[in-house]
Amino acid sequence: MNTQLTHQNLAELVGGILIQGDPGGVITGLNSLSEAVPGEVSFLGNPRYAPQLKTSQASAVLVAANLIEPPMQMALIQVANPTLAFSIVIKLFGPKSKTQATGVHPAASVAENASLDRGKVSIGPNAVIEDEVVIGAGTIIHPGAYIGFGAKLGAGCVIHANAVIKEHCVLGNRVIVHSGAVIGSDGFGYELVQGRHLKIEQVGIVQIDDDVEIGSCTTIDRARFGRTFVGSGTKIDNLVQIGHNVNIGENCIIVSQTGISGSTRLGKYVVMGGQVGVAGHLEIADQVTLLAKSGVTKNIAVSGAYTGYPAKPLIEGRKMLTYPARVPHLLERVKELENKLAELENKFTK
C-alpha cells in the first residue's frame, strides 16, 4: 500500500507549521521542485531555486521562515531547516533500503582468530576478514570488502562493497566507508639514492574517530610511523587523497578531488571545496574555509574564508583572480601608448 499523508500531518511530522494551503490535501510522494507533479512534496533549501516555486507543480513545499512573495498555488510548510526536514520526508516516501541480515555469509572468508559476535554483525559474500581483526557489534561489512590483519572496527560501522581497510588501521564507532575507498595504503615516500628512487617503509596506521564518513575511491595513506588521523564527525567526499601523517580535526568537510599532502594538520570545522590542493607540513587553523581550486602553500593561522593560488583571504584572493582577465585590455593599452610614443619621437626628431 502506498504511503499517504495530509498536509497537516506532514507539517506535524517534520515539526513545521502549515502557513498556506488545505490541511486535508493529500501527499503521496516526493520530488524536486522542477520535476514534482500534483500529489508530491518538495522543498526549497537554496534561495537560488526560489523562482522555480512559481512554476512547480508540487502540491506542498517545505520552506524557511524568510520566504518572500510565496506563490499561492501550493501548500507551504514552514520549517527551521528545509533541507534537514526533507530528510524526514525521504525516509517516509523514498525507496526502502534492504535490511541486512545478521551473521556471516557462507561465501565470506573470516579468520578463526578474528574477534566478532556473529549474531551481532553482518558480513556479506566474498568479504575477507583477516587474522586478529576486531569488529564491533552492529557493524555491516558488505560483499567484497577487505579488512586487513589486526584492524579494529568499532560498533555500528558500515563498510561498503569492495572497500579496503588495511592492516592495523583503527576505526571508531559508526564510521561509514564507501565502495572503492582504501584506508591505510602506503604513504608516498621515497629517497633518491644513486639515481634511483628507494621506497621508505610506511609502518604507521590510520586512525578514524567516531561518526566519520568517507566517500568512494578516496584514499587515506598510513603514516610513515605513528598515525594518520581523522577527527570525529568529519565528512570526506569521493575522490579525495589524504597523505601520510596528516591530522584532520573534528567536524571538517573535505570535498571531491581535494589533495592534502603529508604531515599537514587541519583544525576543527575546516571546509575545503572541490579540487583544493594543500602542500605538506602545513598548519591550517580552526574554522578555515577554502574555496574550490584554492592552493595552500603556507600556514593559515587565522579563521575565515580563503581563495586563489596561493590562497589569500577572500577579498584579496578574489582581486588576484580578476587580474588575469585584465591582461588583454592592458596589452591593448600598452600597444596604444607605444604607438603614441612612436608618433612623438617621429615628431620631435624631424
Image: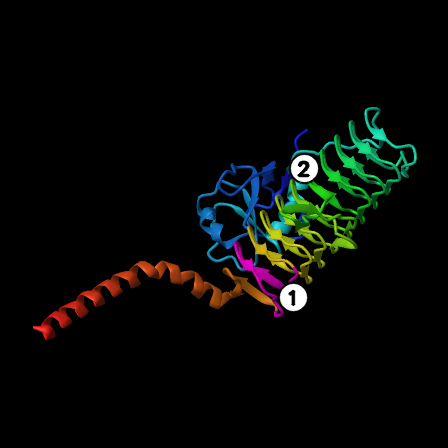
Specify whether residue 288 is painted magenta: yes
Image position of 192 (left or right of 306)? right
Q: Residue at x 80, y 39 (%)?
A: 148
Neighbourhood count class around disc 1 (C-alpha, 10 Å): few under 14, some 14–19, many 20 upward: some
Instruction: Specify the quadrant that holds the N terminus.
Output: top right
Residue 9 shows in the view: no
- Tag 1 near tag 2, CB within 8 Å: no
Identify which amino acid the numbered label 1 is placed on: Ala
Q: Which numbered tag is attached to residue 180?
A: 2
Quadrant for residue 97, please give it: top right
> At numbered mark 1, what does the secondary structure look like: helix, strand or loop?
loop
In the figure, 83 relative to 145: above or below? below
Q: Report the residue marked by disc 1.
A: 285
Q: Residue at x 43, y 61 (%)?
A: 321
Identify which amino acid the numbered label 2 is placed on: Gly
> At numbered mark 2, what does the secondary structure look like: helix, strand or loop?
loop
Q: Residue at x 48, y 53 (%)?
A: 48
Q: Nearer the viewer, residue 340 or 64?
A: 340
Specify whether residue 323 is painted magenta: no
Residue 138 shows in the view: yes
Residue 59 screen position, x and y as percent: 54, 41
Residue 64 screen position, x and y as percent: 57, 56
Alpha carbon of mark 1 to alpha carbon of mark 2: how far? 30 Å
Question: Which segment did they paint magenta?
Answer: 281-302
In the figure, 247 relative to 179: above or below? below
Mark 1 or mark 2: name the one nearer the start of the chain: 2
Q: Residue at x 64, y 62 (%)?
A: 282
